[in-house]
Image: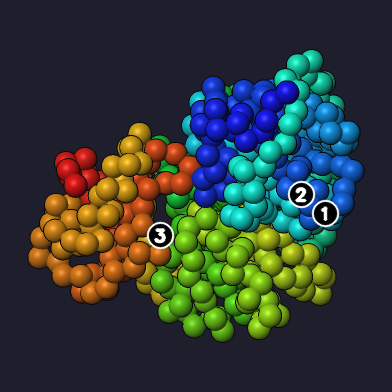
Amino acid sequence: MLTSSSEIIKSGIQFGTSGARGLVTQFTTNACAAFTHAFIRCMEKQFTFKQVAIAIDNRPSSPIMAQACIKALHQLGIEAIYYGVIPTPALAYTSMQDNIPCIMVTGSHIPFDRNGLKFYRPDGEISKTDEKHILNAEAEFETISDLPELIINTKAAVTYVERYTSLFDSTLLTGKRVGVYEHSSAGRDLYADMFIALGAEVVSLERCDEFVPIDTEAVSEADKLKAKKWSVQYDLDFIFSTDGDGDRPLVADENGDWLRGDVLGLLCSMALNIEALAVPVSCNTSIEISNAFKYVVRTKIGSPYVIAEFENLSNQYPSVAGFEANGGYLLNSDILVNGKILKALPTRDAVLPALMLLSMANDKDISHLVKTLPKRVTYSDRVQNFVTDKSLAILNHGSTNPMQLLLKLGFEGFMIKSINLTDGLRLTLSNDDILHLRPSGNAPELRCYAESCDIITSKYYVDKALANVHLIEP
């Protein structure tokens, strides 16, 4: 017999900002089974259920991982409902309606040589406390063999599309040309039909068989050029895409300019008349400057931290939501949209902010809506394959010697107005511009965020910091 805790330790897999992440080679069938057994052990202490739902993204490693998880469920006498390749929020929403736990096999936006597992309770995402319980669970199980056949149930895909098409009139997008950048997104077989059902003319863009690790917080220069080209070539009013598992949106205006995720979240929240927001510390300060909300609380980066604030906010405000700089939108309250109830979905979702933006734009250009917001522009990028220990050492040095770090990064002549250590090292400069360094919670990467009054300055800060960070020996 194997033990879940020992197999998890042996695998070297760790929880990141959202789910367990690691190299594909670490996710052996026994490692996947260990996490599944541990997860079920924790859930059975809190909930009663006889089924668990599972879905995957388009990574080549995902099917066999799902098979291992399903085999583990069979060992426990639990029925597995396999929904195939669908967006994470589609799996989460349907499972919440059915009051059962679920497991999403996905590495989200990280490269295809890595993968992960996201776990959901019947009432939503697991918490950081749940993560600790999973890691420490002592569930015994037999070695995994004879993997089961994967038989797809289409219910979750249909339910997810209906969640949004039922909110709007079928003429909402009449006259609009929408480009759907499909790449390898888990939702690529759903999005075109959804926009068509709302009246749009859809152009499918660049579907591919190889997995593409789209990071909605660090859009590549190639994707920026593609969007501008597509916008002109196909006379598009809007471009929609997502990351690998479909929980983070990537949308572009009529000019092919990708919107920052926190700008999209801000506009969506305004369209939904949200009263209280929970957002990570890395989000644009135009959220507060806009004066559109009764209360805004800042959290560490990662959806579990945003969700952790929801209970307190919901005790004080009828409509509560959150979003992240990556664009993922979390709706914690049942709210009315066009006189119809939209049920809460307190996990990252890519579709809701995109549709609310289109609804809000109506007969206006999307770029016009963006220009109505306070002029604060955020830019971010990352250094990949940057050892996490080095990132932490640099930030530790910077927290005690911030001016020295600023000089090492090449920023001479700047003064520091304030320091925020909520998540990483966030420096507000004397001119109110912001420079923020933080190691990724999902991969060996160092992320840099900057905020200023224009994109040129923000990009300058990020490019300069990331160019010089290699030279720092803390």
Mark 1 and mark 3 in contact? Answer it, CB < 8 Å: no
- The kind of secondary structure element at disc 2 is helix
Q: Eyeballing the image, is 218 above or below 189?
A: below
Q: Quadrant of the N terminus?
A: top right
Looking at numbered disc 2 in the image, what kind of residue is underneath it? Met
Q: Which mark is drawn over residue 423?
A: 3
State the image quarter where residue 91 is shown. Answer: top right
Looking at the rendered structure, the secondary structure element under dot 1 is loop
- Could you tell me residue 185's position as x and y percent? 62, 37
Q: Can residue 411 be seen at all in this image of the molecule?
A: no
Work out whether residue 285 or residue 474 is closer to the camera in this orientation and state it: 474
Residue 146 as seen in the image, left or right of residue 225: right
Q: Position of residue 236 (x, y in %)?
A: 56, 49
Q: Residue furthest top?
A: 146
Q: Horizontal placement of 82 versus 138: left or right?
A: right
> Hey, what amino acid is under mark 1?
Phe
Q: Amino acid at mark 3?
A: Asp
Q: Are marks 1 and 2 in contact (CB under 8 Å)?
A: yes
Q: CA distance from mark 3 to mark 2?
A: 29 Å
At horizontal 49% and vertical 66% (from top left) the residue drawn is 299
Image quarter of residue 242: top right
| Residue wearing tag 1 | 47
Measured Cα–Cα span from mark 1 to mark 3? 32 Å
Query: Is residue 33 something that shows in the picture?
Result: yes
Alpha carbons under labels 1 and 2: distance apart? 6 Å
Mark 1 burial class by Cα count in 10 Å: few <14, some 14-19, many 20+? some
- SS at circle 3: loop
Quadrant in the rendering for residue 55 = top right
Q: Is residue 157 left or right of residue 116?
A: right
Q: Which residue is mark 2?
A: 43
Q: Residues within 10 Å of mark 3 (few under 14, many from 20)?
A: some
